[in-house]
Amino acid sequence: MSVKYDIVEVRIPFNKIEDDQFIREKIKGKKKNLGKHFFYRINKRSIDARQKIVYYLLRLELSNEEFAKEDFSNLISNYPTLNPDKQVLIIGAGPAGYFAALECLRLGLVPTVLDRGKDVRARRRDLKAIQQDHVVNPHSNYCFGEGGAGTYSDGKLYTRSHKRGKIQGVLEMLVAHGAKRDILIDAHPHIGSNKLPGIVSKIRETIEANGGKVIFNCCVTDLLVEEGKIIGATSYDGTKYRADATILATGHSARDIYELLDQKGIEIEAKPFAIGVRIEHPQAFIDKVQYKQEPRSEFLPAAPYKLVSQVEGKGVFSFCMCPGGLIVPAATAPGEIVVNGMSLSKRDSPYANSGVVTEISLEDLEKHGYKGTFAGIQLQKEIEQKVFALGDGSQKAPAQRLKDFVFGRASKSLPDTSYIPGIYPAQISEAFPDWIFERLREGIQAFDAKLKGYLTNVAIVVATESRTSSPIKIPRDRESYMHEGVDGFFPCGEGAGYAGGILSAAMDGQNVAKGVAKYLNIKG
């Protein structure tokens, strides 16, 4: 049996990250009793750019024998025989829905996944239609379809929700389906929108190969209720899907589902969310500010940033920052402009973009005349439609140079952008309530003190970043994960208000599936 030494942590100058001998000497400096021959592998990797020299921080695992090649294939094989009498309906094929389905398989339950959109390959045609033809398919777009919103908007795998489950298990499952091992070691793991679709389709293959079903172009229009219990759902074509338990994992933009729940008398409630704009800088500018070098070294990735400020007790913060990324159209219905960000796996675009948003509390909504359960959605729609009305009826987005936005000046010209549908100069503040605009402009000015030079007219503001999270929460019991008032109904993921990204949604899907198993008296 190999002898494992203690984990060792070392700081490596960025230009030595591929220098094996240098790293070995650093290890020896930390571990005096190492023999001549030892092996190491990276356990965790992050970047420290606070000093003049940029360092990689490495946590290394040591051994006196060569490490065996990691094999995660056992995670997608050896599933138990499924119990045909334990049927679980899962509405939504995003990370929450798919990881709930995988967990159902592990527990011997039969999952059937319904999604209103298309599979990842067919979905690409609808994304092209938005980008080039300005046509929005309300069932297949950047938010709806196989893999959910994260599939074609970056595949970032960072979460603060460590208490919700084992993050490592989700990451390993993604590696088992084709993701690079790098996601297991990077502090802020990322897959990329060019790689994630293939991984998502392989997850579907695992579900189907082991007894589950995935059905696309299947928009749910009704829930089947008998004696206060959800027993399934009805699709747009009248097909009824019956099940012993139903998991709702529809994502944060399925507004028709919230309306359906309200019509059925199923309790939902308003929750805080955030809204704002997307800001795009040249990536070289962010690299220079963050790494203090120009051009960026080949040994360093495109530099990210994370900024937070407070304006009158309310947070203004960067969200979904995409180094080396693109701005994409994320509308889910005609007559609205919504933007989001994404990066490909290499993060090699010449642009860096980030959502810059302010928190919207329930008190904010009430104070400014937005009342009731759908107050947040009302505000979202109002802004998205006003932004659309500024333009020519296409998916071109209004934009403004950053300093002009902050100081209320019209932009006479705009720089090039990554946003394919196109941009045009506009006073973006016209589409926002004054209280939101003022909060954003003050927050951005505070950003400039934290990231010198951030407030520059080489950057642009593009509207609107409005789908940061769900403005609706579907209440559920903390221990059983079942809706507090409806038997057999399990709200899940971002759309239910219990997740904020791929990882947290996937972990929530796993936890909810375990709750379903307990409900159906299955031990696992």
Image (cartoon, rainbow, N blue to C red):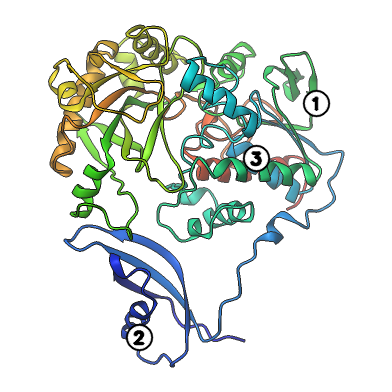
Spatial separation of the CA atoms under disc 3 and disc 1: 19 Å
Q: In terms of sequence position, does the residue under pointer 3 or pointer 1 come before the other?
A: 3
Disc sitting over residue 28 in the figure: 2
Q: Residues within 10 Å of mark 2 (few under 14, many from 20)?
A: some
In 3D space, how far apart are the residues under numbered discs 1 and 2 (Cα atoms)? Answer: 62 Å
Residue type pointed to by label 3:
Tyr
Give percent across and percent down for residue 5: 47, 83
Secondary structure found at label 1:
strand
The span from disc 2 to disc 3 (Cα, nearest Å) is: 45 Å
Residue that appears at 39% across and 63% down: 45
Q: Nearer the viewer, residue 206 or 510?
A: 206
Give SS at disc 2: helix
Q: Residue at x 16, y 15 (%)?
A: 410
- Residue 212 in which image quadrant: top right
2 vs 3, front mark: 2
Q: For residue 98, which numbered disc appears in the image?
A: 3
Q: How many marks?
A: 3
**Residues under numbered marks 2 and 3 in contact, where contact means CB atoms less than 8 Å apart:** no
